[in-house]
Each structure stands twice: as structure tokens, then as C-alpha cells.
Image: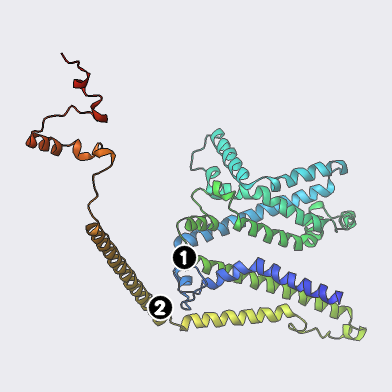
């Protein structure tokens, strides 16, 4: 019970992990085949291949790919060479200095790419001025600066890969070659280099991929030669189209194809080695029956399936015409927009009628309300009319003499305070 639960838990974890890792790539690849002008998977409109055509017509993207390939090739050559030299130096240096040397070689990996880009630009600009060269010299060239800036830290990755392979090398082979009269160059070229070839190939692939996707360092050094990542960043800043998704699909497809091809090749080599190891003396003397390319090689089967699916998609793209579907979608969007406009007009008309009804009700309520009285109590002392011009007119028309009776029974009448003579 516990083993079954553990096995199920591991499979669930793997599924969640790969969905998290590969889900965005799958979604972005699917958006390359949707006719929507904005990269989206839902709602699905029409199956189309027009974004691939627009991708190959975008000169900025094509120029960025060309610059990335040139810079990637230069970075591979320089980084692998420095990494191999660093790995050989690490195995031959005095043991007490290996820790210090290893720390210095690995340090560029820990430095932010922004710092590397700025320092590369400033350093080579100073060198250019010291030599008295102009602004158009090769030391100010964007490709040169980008290759130098990327190689400062990519060489450290290459060295780690090469050191792992070099640790399994038997130094006695080189010593035997030297004892037999070979020079150091011959021993390196005929013994050490063939042994290091798989690691060199792996380091070269790693260096090219690291250079192809680098942005932090390249953004300060590219000059007039923007790479693909720079162009994509500038396009995203001003709005993207599904042509970017088409580029992502092509990159993913090429990566999967070469990964399956490499896996099928390695599996084939393992099967051939196992067949030769288990062969009898008679089979070795005659002709060994090697396993077929697909026997026990799942990677080869997947490679063929992937190739057939790619050919099918390309054939469908050349024969399929999404014009009618796109026209229907546009007509449907137009009808939906008109319906939406009519609904908005209807809502505004209802709101206007409701507002007029409310205003009419408020006007009738004001007419039916009686005029408020000005009698505020206290004998109309604080009535507004007593302070206005109407009161003065009334007093002047009636010509009533002022009374000296101040109230309270005439107690405060001035006449009552006079004594009779």
C-alpha cells in the first residue's frame, strides 16, 4: 500500500513539474496557429499559418537571428578555448593553489550580467582611446564587444563541463606517448583531444545556447548589431504579434528534434556495444548481427513520429486556405459589434426616458407644494417682509403714525416716564 501510494505520488509530482515547466511553451506554440491578431489560445478562431509567413518577412527578426548566429559562433570558439585552457591549468597547477584558482575562474558566473556588460563597454572604450583609434574601430564594434562580454562568464560554464571529463583522464596515457617519442603537441592532439571530444561538443552546445539567449550583458554591448533577444525585447515593449509565437514554435521544434536525434544516436551506440560484448567467438569471426535502428530504441521511434508530424503539418500548410474562415470570423465580429452598439443605444435611450420621467415627477411635486408661510413666530419680528421694501411701501401707504407703545403695558413708553407739570 505504501509503495503504491509512493509511486502514484511520484508520478503526480512529475506530471505537475513538467506541466509547470513545459506548459507555457506549449500554450505559446499553439497560439502561433490561431488567426487572432493577439497571441492567445482561447477563444479559438481559425487555423492559420500566416504568422510563419510574417515571421520570415520581418527583416528585424531575420537580422537579429543572423547577428545571434554570428555572435554565438564567436562565443563558442573563444569560450571553449578558454574553458579547455582553464581546465588543463586546474589539473596541473600546484594543489595548494587549486582552490584559489578555481574561485577566480568561477567568479564571473556570480557577477550580474549587467555589471559584466557595463565593465566590458567601459574597459574596451578606454583601450580604444589609449590606442588613439576612432569610434568606428573594431574595438568599438558591437559584435566584438558582445563576444568578449559573453565569453567572460560562458567560459566558466565550459570549464566546469571540461573539468568533469578531464578528471577521468589517465595521465599515464600521455606519459606513455611522450616516452615513445611523441611531442607534447602530438600527445595532446592524438590522445587527449579525442578523449575530450564529447565534453568539448557538450561545452560548445552549452556556450551557443547561453550566448543565443543572453540579454543582460548584450543589452550594453550590441551597438549596431542587435541580437534576437534584443529585437524581441523591443517588440514586446511596443506590442507583440503571433509571429513571436511562430518563432517560439520553431525553436521548440528544433530543440525537440535534435534532442531526440542525439538520444537515438546514444541509444544506438549502447545497443551496438551490448551486441558486440555478448557476441560469441564465431559471431565475431563472421559477421555480427547488429540490432536494427528501431529495436529497443524509443527515441528513434519518437523521432520518426515527430518527423512525420512535421511533414504533415507542412503539407497541410501549403494546401489549407483559411481565408473563408477568417472572413466568417470577421463578419461575426462585425455583427457582434453592431449588436453591442444597439444594446448600448437602447440602454442610453432607457436611461434618458427614466431621467425625463424623474424630472417630470419632481416638477409636479414642486407645483403641488403650498407656498411656505413667512410667519416665523415671535410676532413676525423676524419675518423677511418686515425688512424688505414691501414693508416700507405698506407703511408709507397707510401713513400710520408710529406708536410709542413698546409693549409690556406701556411701561417702557417714554411718555410715561415724564412727570405731569
Whole-angstrom CA distance, mark 1 to mark 2, is 18 Å
The answer to whether residue 253 is above or below residue 412 is below
Give me the residue at 66% from left, 55% from top. 77
Furthest-front residue in view?
421
From the viewer's perspective, tell me whether residue 73 is left or right of residue 288: left
Give me the residue at 58% from left, 40% from top. 124
The answer to whether residue 202 is above or below residue 404 is below
Spot occupied by residue 182 in the image (x, y as percentages of width and height) = 84, 55
Spot occupied by residue 387 in the image (x, y as percentages of width and height) = 19, 35
Spot occupied by residue 63 in the image (x, y as percentages of width and height) = 49, 59
Label 1, residues with CA under 10 Å away: few <14, some 14-19, many ≥20: some
Residue that carries the numbered disc 2 in the rendered image: 329
Residue that carries the numbered disc 1 in the rendered image: 241
Residue 131 found in image quarter: top right
The answer to whether residue 67 is above or below residue 324 is above
Give me the residue at 19% from left, 37% from top. 386
From the viewer's perspective, tell me whether residue 403 is left or right of residue 92: left
Amino acid at each position: 500500500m505504501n509503495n503504491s501510494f509512493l509511486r502514484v505520488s511520484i508520478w503526480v509530482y512529475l506530471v505537475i513539474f513538467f506541466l509547470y515547466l513545459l506548459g507555457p511553451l506549449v500554450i505559446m506554440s499553439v497560439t502561433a496557429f490561431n488567426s487572432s491578431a493577439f497571441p492567445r489560445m482561447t477563444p479559438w478562431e481559425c487555423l492559420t499559418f500566416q504568422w510563419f509567413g510574417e515571421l520570415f518577412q520581418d527583416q528585424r527578426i531575420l537580422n537579429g537571428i543572423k547577428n545571434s548566429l554570428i555572435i554565438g559562433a564567436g562565443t563558442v570558439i573563444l569560450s571553449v578555448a578558454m574553458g579547455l585552457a582553464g581546465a588543463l591549468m586546474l589539473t596541473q597547477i600546484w594543489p595548494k593553489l587549486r582552490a584559489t584558482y578555481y574561485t577566480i575562474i568561477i567568479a564571473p558566473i556570480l557577477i550580474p550580467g549587467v555589471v559584466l556588460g557595463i565593465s566590458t563597454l567601459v574597459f574596451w572604450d578606454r583601450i580604444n582611446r589609449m590606442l588613439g583609434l576612432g569610434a568606428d574601430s573594431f574595438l568599438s564594434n558591437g559584435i566584438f564587444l558582445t563576444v568578449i562580454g559573453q565569453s567572460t562568464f560562458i567560459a566558466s560554464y565550459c570549464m566546469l563541463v571540461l573539468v568533469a571529463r578531464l578528471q577521468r583522464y589517465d595521465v599515464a596515457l600521455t606519459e606513455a606517448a611522450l616516452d615513445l617519442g611523441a611531442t607534447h603537441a602530438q600527445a595532446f592532439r592524438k590522445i587527449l583531444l579525442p578523449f575530450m571530444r564529447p565534453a568539448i561538443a557538450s561545452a560548445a552546445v552549452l556556450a551557443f545556447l547561453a550566448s543565443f539567449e543572453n540579454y543582460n550583458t548584450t543589452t550594453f554591448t550590441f551597438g549596431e548589431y542587435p541580437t534576437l533577444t534584443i529585437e524581441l525585447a523591443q517588440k514586446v515593449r511596443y506590442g507583440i504579434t503571433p509571429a513571436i509565437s511562430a518563432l517560439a514554435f520553431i525553436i521548440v521544434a528544433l530543440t525537440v528534434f535534435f534532442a531526440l536525434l542525439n538520444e537515438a544516436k546514444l541509444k544506438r551506440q549502447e545497443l551496438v556495444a551490448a551486441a558486440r560484448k555478448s557476441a560469441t567467438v564465431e559471431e565475431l569471426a563472421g559477421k555480427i548481427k547488429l540490432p536494427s535502428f528501431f529495436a529497443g530504441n524509443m527515441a528513434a521511434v519518437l523521432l520518426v513520429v515527430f518527423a512525420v508530424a512535421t511533414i504533415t503539418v507542412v503539407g497541410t500548410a501549403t494546401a489549407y486556405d483559411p481565408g473563408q474562415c477568417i472572413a466568417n470570423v470577421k463578419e461575426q465580429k462585425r455583427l457582434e459589434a453592431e449588436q453591442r452598439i444597439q444594446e448600448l443605444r437602447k440602454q442610453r435611450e432607457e436611461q434618458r426616458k427614466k431621467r425625463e420621467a424623474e424630472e417630470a415627477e419632481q416638477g409636479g411635486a414642486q407645483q403641488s407644494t403650498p407656498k411656505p408661510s413667512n410667519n416665523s413666530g415671535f410676532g413676525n419680528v423676524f419675518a423677511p417682509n418686515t425688512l424688505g421694501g414691501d414693508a416700507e411701501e405698506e407703511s408709507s401707504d397707510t401713513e400710520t403714525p408710529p406708536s410709542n407703545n413698546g409693549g409690556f403695558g406701556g411701561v417702557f413708553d417714554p411718555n410715561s416716564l415724564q412727570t405731569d407739570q
